[in-house]
Amino acid sequence: MYYEVLGDPSPTAETVVLSAGLGGSGSFWQPQLAALAAERRVILYDHNGTGRSGGTLAPGYRMADMAAELAALLQRLEVQRCHLVGHALGGIIGLQLALDYPGLLHSLVVVNGWPVLDSQTRRCFNVRRDMLLNSGVEAYVRAQPLFLYPADWLSQHEALLEQEQAHQVAHFQGMENLLHRLEALMAADLRARLPALEAPVLALCARDDLLVPYPCSAALAAALPQGHYQEMAYGGHAMSVTDPETFTSLLLAWLKRHPMEPV
């Protein structure tokens, strides 16, 4: 898988791993990179089958496979313990990773995540899947911002959205890969295993998220032994992009409350 290491390159440095959502591209975290890399080692990657990672995913692909791929990458980079920040699907990967590889995560931030798929999220995913299958990649990409960003932000960033759309069409992960990843995400149900997750977890959400209702994050925090809940009043599903200042300040505050001793 394609990855980048920013900030302190030492394997003993405090390490933060960033995992994107369904799009899979590590570039999603661009607004947070400078602040995080100023004092830590930051690892970001493109999920298998997306972006610069390429590859073809087989039917039956699961969340456990995504976690295993990330675990293999961290082993290759000699990461013995780290923080993980995951957005939606990336957060579910983090939960799976913490459960399947105990002790690897010092802390976890799940951004707009859930313990099991909510009916509203399923409705949105079904609409997006139908659009991809029936109308094609360009229509899918054109509609995607409606699920990610608040309406006022959309109207104020038309030029940026047009550039983003052209880039995403040109670098689309492929219909089959996206459908396999989406199917794995929609099928994930970690509720029975969450009480065994020992690491502290911040369930961070935006109250105006259309795709993942904020009570999903509250339910996730409540299901965890060390679950913490925090919400932003504004920002939509991709609030790390629409309100990066507030999001980054909350993220840095969490990391400072959960420092790692040098390995």
Image: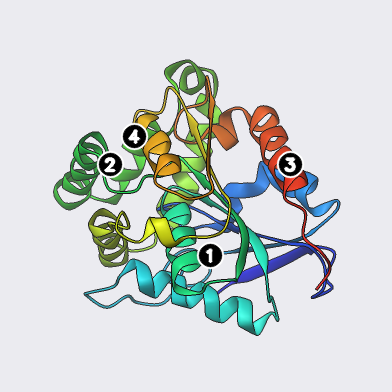
Residue type highlighted by circle 1: Asp
Residue that numbered label 1 is attached to = 46
Residue that numbered label 2 is attached to = 139
First in sequence: mark 1 or mark 2? 1
Foreground: disc 1 or disc 4: 4
Relative to 157, residue 195 above or below: below
Q: Is disc 3 surrounded by few (<14), some (14 to 19) or many (20+) residues within 10 Å?
A: some
> Residue, x 65% and y 32% (percent of image)?
244
State how far apart marks 1 and 2 are (Cα). 23 Å
Foreground: disc 1 or disc 2: 1
Q: Position of residue 83 (x, y in %)?
A: 65, 59
> Which quadrant is home to the N terminus?
bottom right
Relative to 91, residue 210 above or below: above
Q: Is residue 1 left or right of residue 151?
A: right
State how far apart marks 3 and 1 are (Cα). 23 Å
State how far apart marks 4 and 3 are (Cα). 25 Å
First in sequence: mark 2 or mark 3? 2
Residue 151 or residue 235, whichever sits in front: 235
Identify the coloring. Answer: rainbow
Total marks shown come to: 4
Q: Is residue 52 left or right of residue 92?
A: right
Residue 229 or residue 63, whichever sits in front: 229
> Residue, x 41% and y 77% (percent of image)?
55
Q: Position of residue 73 (x, y in %)?
A: 58, 78
Foreground: disc 2 or disc 4: 4
Foreground: disc 4 or disc 3: 3
- On residue 252, the disc is 3
